[in-house]
Image: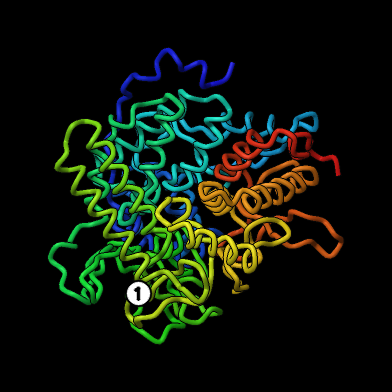
Amino acid sequence: MSADDRVASREDTVAHVAPADTLTPADRYQELFVDVQMSRVFDDSKTFVDCAPRQTPERILAAYRAERAQPGFELRTFVHAHFREEAVTASHYVSDPQQTLREHIDGLWDVLTREPAGHPPRSSLLPLPKRYVVPGGRFRELYYWDSYFTMLGLAESGRPQLLRQMADNFAYLIDTYGHVPNGNRSYYLSRSQPPVFALMVELFERKGVRRALDYLPQLRREHAYWMDGADGLRRGEARRHCVRLDDGSVLNRYWDERDTPREESHLEDVMTARRAKRPAHEVYRDLRAGAASGWDFSSRWLGDARELASIRTTALLPVDLNSFLHGLETRIATLSERCGDTATATDFRRRADARRDALTRWLWDEAAGAFVDYDWQLDRRRENLSAACAAPLFAGFAGAAQAARSAQAIRARLLQEGGLATSERDSGEQWDQPNGWAPLQWLAIDGLRRYGETSLADDIAARWLKTVSSLYERESKLVEKYTLRHAPDGARGGGGGGGEYPLQDGFGWTNGVTRKLLHEDPAHAANRSRAGTR
């Protein structure tokens, strides 16, 4: 019996949610935090901000101030005496050789599920009322846009109770904080991620988990979060997530409320800012906004494709973000009409139409035959084509001719041996060549199918399943990202590289998208893949 079955009888019980400590580790531990991160007490900067204190933070900070100047004081010893490190149990991700890929994924959900009772007191973890699925590896908390792609697999694995509980968790986050944070950590509260709650709500209803109408208040509140400040903007001005363009239209960008180093990457951000030719606080804001995009990091956001210090995320109007917001506005209009609120339905239909027109005017590149990001500060479209160009097809607002040309551009410029490339550039960043990512495969596959481009969609799906299953057969696991190129020995489907941390095993959204594709194509050889057979 799975954990999902065991909780079926109590799935709607409202769990007690412990009060959250919304002060971040940097706010809470002040100079101790800076000293730990800058001294590299832990190999991974995320380790310290995820530690649980062994006593009250106030007493720890007071003890540090009293002891640090004493002879023989060792910071590493002090930290290990006062904090408990969260363990990562890598052995859980090794599959039984008798398991097929599908069985491996179905069995991983319990491994990746976390219980509310497991929230350590006084840590950076924001308590949630119900169970949830984490990505895996160093990512031991709920992540926003990851979870939608994870949910695709949960639905095919027959886990409706877990889906329902995750639905309630996301509603709780919006009700409590006004938005869905990047993840349920205090240091993620200053930003969100790609707004996919509307996609979750649609999935819940389609699978009989919850009525979409139940979440209309949260959908409207999330929209208000993303559009805060838009009404007072003059042409050419920006505030938080909103930019008003020269024709009066409003589009959105990624944003973080803070302009300090990311706490989970403090040392890395400080070193990046030191290489920049502009004020450090501007670099920090753009690094944080890049993290909010989920594409952390990519040449999409860089002025110089080989230099992270040139990041300028807040200067760009991303095609995927605005596609998701179009979907959110369309969903609010539909649900408002369903409940008889015609005024709100009319308002949000107008908003969605205005966004579609602005996207076509500013982000459609006629020469490239694709939607691209727009640099509102430099008043020009970005030339680097990325897999985000599929988002307008996924959202369903592209015209038929635009969709056909987008499919041609995807095939000609992004299709690789192992699936859909993240972008055209090999920058050394993880959201670029040669890596492929599960969520981007799904956006393209589903978007292309929506417009009848089934041949290309099926080709991408088949290539991706071959990539994932090849690594599973060799190494008995699924991972966060994959290289789409063949290795020198001809092997296919290696783990991806680049970025700020080692390749992570698990892995939530890879499991979800792969499980969905296995269900849709039962004849694909990946359904017969078994661990460790190569």
Please give the name of the residue rendered at 64% of the width and 29% of the height, measured from the top-left corner: 107
Please give the name of the residue rendered at 38% of the width and 52% of the height, measured from the top-left corner: 324
Q: Looking at this rendering, what residue extends furthest in the bottom direction? A: 277
Quarter of the image where one finds residue 514: top right
Q: Position of residue 150 (x, y in %)?
A: 52, 40
Q: Nearer the viewer, residue 418 or 272?
A: 418
Please give the name of the residue rendered at 26% of the width and 39% of the height, measured from the top-left corner: 218
Q: Looking at this rendering, what residue extends furthest in the top direction? A: 9
Q: Nearer the viewer, residue 272 or 521?
A: 521
Specify the quadrant that holds the C terminus: top right
Here the colouring is rainbow
Q: Looking at this rendering, what residue extends furthest in the front direction? A: 401
Using a 10 Å C-alpha cutoff, classify the residue at mark 1 as few (fewer than 14 neighbours), some (14 to 19) or many (20 or more).
some
Relative placement, left or right, of 142 versus 520 is: left
Relative placement, left or right, of 348 versus 416 is: left
- Visible in this render: residue 76? yes
Residue indicated by mark 1:
315
Q: Amino acid at mark 1?
A: Ala
Q: Position of residue 301 (x, y in %)?
A: 45, 72
Quarter of the image where one finds residue 477: top right
Q: Position of residue 486 (x, y in %)?
A: 78, 61
Q: Position of residue 396 (x, y in %)?
A: 43, 50
Please give the name of the residue rendered at 52% of the width and 37% of the height, measured from the top-left corner: 152
Disc 1 element: helix
Count of all numbered marks drawn on residues in the image: 1
- Visible in this render: residue 69? no
**Considering only vertical position in the picture, is 246 above or below 449?**
below
Specify the quadrant that holds the N terminus: top right
**Considering only vertical position in the picture, is 449 above or below 309?**
above
